Image: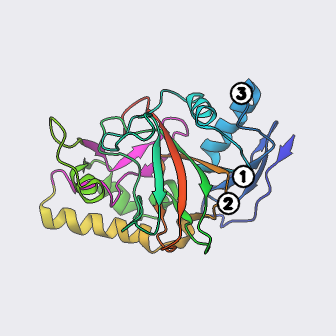
Amino acid sequence: MFNVRKTNVDAQFEVINQSYETLEVETLTPHIGAKVRGVDLSQPLTNEQARDVHQAWIDWKILVFPNQHLNRDQHKAFARRWGKLHVHPMQPTYGGDEEVLVVKTTRDSAYTSGDGWHSDVTCDPVPPLGSMLYITETPASGGGDTLFADMYLAYQMLSDSMKEFLDPLVAEHDGAGPYVGSYKSTPPEGGYPKSQHPVIVTHPDSGKKLLYVNRGFTSHIVDLGQSESNAVLEMLYRLIDSTPRLYCRVDWEPNSLAFWDNRCTQHHAVWDYWPNSRYGERVSIVGDQPPRH
């Protein structure tokens, strides 16, 4: 049995104390993020390995698997252990594979995808439950890290009065803003995806409450006036922007795969390495239910 190596944490917040039979798990922070060794993702997982990976993923929200050598089919096969693969609503296909989102930045890039706090595709009625990004090229200059933020902890840091105020509210998530900005696209038939989700969501696996608004997709809070909605959302976004204790920082190495829980995290790709290059491929897993209070 492999034990988790971790540090002490404030007693105010939950301490995860877990061990896994088939994995070596090294935590990156006390609340979010772990590096996983002892498993070869190019090979089919045993049932015991899949159980431990799933539990570690629920516990730590973002798992990093270093030194993995995968082709595209192996990457997709690993993701399919958790469900059907998601097709991004706006991303053009690359290499004829609509289930793979290519994350490629070069000296000719004006921006990098994901440069700003967001959860993936929350404009969908049922957003992806998780994503797996496999990075094979990192910037020669260094940089190109990805930040992840813990939305359980963000919720816990709110006052009881604010939790009570936010609890019944619903927000609209609109794909128009990010998709026009990132893809310079014309609207698809029927318009850009748009959905309403609770501001406070209960995670279906952990049973814990979390904050479910993000700067990338959330347009407004339903039933509040525009100025009220803007003020409340900006307060919540500033909590995420300015609270480092929420974060785990993934310092990518070539041939590393990260698997994050899209239901309880946000992430931010750091654009600090131009004119150097970075390359990866992302596969996302279709959610099994809409976000629920």
Q: Return the residue at label 2.
A: 253
Q: Residue furthest top?
A: 47
Q: Would residue 19 be found to the left or right of residue 229 on screen?
A: right
Question: Is residue 266 in view?
Answer: no
Mark 2, Cα crowd under 10 Å, few <14 / some 14-19 / many 20+, is some
Give the x, y percent position of residue 277: 53, 65
Q: Are marks 1 and 3 in contact (CB under 8 Å)?
A: no
Among numbered discs 2 and 3, the one appearing first in the sequence? 3
Find residue 107 and report its image quarter: bottom left
Q: Return the residue at label 1.
A: 66
The kind of secondary structure element at disc 1 is loop
Comparing 196 with 45, the one in front is 45
Among numbered discs 1 and 3, the one appearing first in the sequence? 3
Among numbered discs 1 and 2, the one appearing first in the sequence? 1
For the record, the magenta segment spans 195-223
Q: Would residue 209 be found to the left or right of residue 140 on screen?
A: left
Q: Return the residue at label 3.
A: 44
Give the x, y percent position of residue 89: 31, 39
Give the x, y percent position of residue 44: 71, 27
Comparing 74 with 122, the one in front is 74
